[in-house]
Image (spheres, helix red, strand yellow):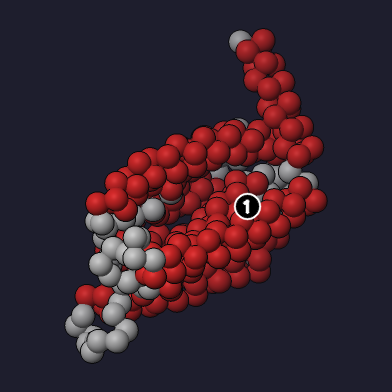
Amino acid sequence: MALTDLGARSIARSLARIFTTYVTPANVRTFEVLIIRLAVLFFIGHLALIFALNNIPALYRGESFNYLKAIYTPFSFILAYEVFLLVIILPESMTEFIGKQFEIITLITLRSFFHDIADVHMHSPLSLSDPAVMSLGYDLIASLVMFGLTVAFHRLHSRHREHEGKEPLTRFINLKKSMSVCLLVVLAITSFYNLQSWLAHAIPAFVNNTSFPDPNKFFYVDFFNVMVYADVLLLIISFLYDSSFYTVMRNASFIISTVLLRLSLSMERPTNHIIIIVAFVFSIAVMLTLQFKQKTTPQHSV
């Protein structure tokens, strides 16, 4: 038993060293620049593809594509970078980790606007009862509400950060760093697999001139599944350092929020927006309740 525990600690320390060595501000900045360059390159490429499909007779498919659809592409790269930041922020704070999930789901919702607006026929009369217009309205209103709730969540966290205390042990930080390394590997594998799956559906859709598959159902569902189990694992391990009811309640609320965010990715609008907002409000309500408790209790524990 002791040898097993010693081996696990050794693996955690080794992975933590990998994280510390490679996840540096300089390397993160290099990756950020790479993502920006790829976003610009693929944005221009998407515009060129739309131009070719609309103007080259051999490629024309009977209808013109809206150039606004190309905006969806650079947003996808921005989201990929945000998911990367989500993984590497894990060792810093569980609360910031959840806050970053809120940011990502808000950006996914906002990105849907750019996807849907390209399907609206701008030169024909529109009405509020038009499904395309209603879809745009859902995206805009929901993303605005999510943005406001995300700001409120970060505001609560920063205002009362001192009540959360300090991380109990270097061992726990090393454990979270090792989990980040594992999640980076999982992110790379699932991204490659999901890209392959999406292309397997998108290419026949392009050839047969049918609707393209929704990228959200390929690129984020699997990763949010992993996030749920990572959150549960962190909750269980955190018992070793703080098993108070209030800390368990806070971390459990974060897991519930992650589960709801995952469920929203498999739902249609506006139900998915409602589920996301419920997840945001639930986490904020728990944080507010805990902060009320901290203000009325002389001794704090995390």
Q: Residue at x 68, y 38 (%)?
A: 177
Q: Residue at x 35, y 41 (%)?
A: 200
Residue 169 on image: x %, y %: 73, 37
User: Is 141 on the left-hand or right-hand side of 169?
Assistant: left
Instruction: Give residue 144's quadrant in the image.
Output: bottom left
Residue 184 on image: x %, y %: 60, 39
| Closest to the observer, 166 or 124 | 124
| Closest to the observer, 128 or 273 | 128
Residue 78 on image: x %, y %: 57, 60
Residue 268 on image: x %, y %: 26, 60
What amino acid does circle 1 point to? Answer: Leu
User: Is 264 on the left-hand or right-hand side of 295?
Assistant: left
Q: Is residue 103 visible?
A: no
Instruction: Look at the picture and state if 29 lies above or below 234.
Output: below
Instruction: Look at the picture and state if 91 lies above or below 280.
Output: above
Q: Residue at x 42, y 39 (%)?
A: 196
Which secondary structure lies at badge 1?
helix
Q: Residue furthest front?
A: 57
Within 10 Å of disc 1 (Cα), the crowding (few <14, some 14-19, many 20+) is: some
User: Is 243 on the left-hand or right-hand side of 34?
Assistant: left
Instruction: Give residue 164's quadrant in the image.
Output: bottom right
| Closest to the observer, 58 or 15 | 58
Q: Which residue is mark 1?
A: 85
Q: Residue at x 60, y 60 (%)?
A: 41
